[in-house]
Image (cartoon, rainbow, N blue to C red):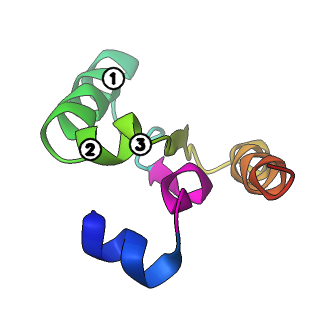
Amino acid sequence: MAAFGRLCGENVSRRIILMTTMWNKATLAECESRENEIKTNYWRGMLNSGSNVVRFDGSGSSVWAAVDLILDSLDT
């Protein structure tokens, strides 16, 4: 994460949107379990640094949720 910060600038983590997929391919419980595993085992550092997670369920509204977060991060 430190190298990424040096390349992209300070506080870059808050501008990173991590997106989980396949929400329309399994049960809600299975997807939530997998998402928690990913957050804990792989994305913890980025989340602690301010990155956000959005769930992509195949809908346009889930894409717009990510776009909204990106636009909000530009204001700060």
Q: Residue furthest top?
A: 29
- The residue carrying mark 3 is 49
Amino acid type, residue under disc 1 in the picture: Glu
Mark linked to residue 45: 2
Q: Which of 30 and 18 is in front in this view?
A: 18
For the point 69% across and 50% down, the residue is 66
Left or right: where 3 falls relative to 70: left
Q: Circle 1 sits in a helix, a strand or a loop, which is it?
A: helix
x, y percentage for residue 45?
A: 26, 44
Disc 1 residue crowd, few under 14, some 14–19, many 20+, Cα 10 Å: some
| Span highlighted in magenta in the image | 10-19
Left or right: where 17 falls relative to 33: right
Left or right: where 35 falls relative to 21: left
- Closer to the camera: disc 1 or disc 2? 2
Amino acid type, residue under disc 2 in the picture: Gly
For the point 26% across and 26% down, the residue is 36
Q: Tell me the distance, in whole angstroms, between the alpha carbons under discs 1 and 2.
A: 19 Å
For the point 61% across and 57% down, the residue is 15
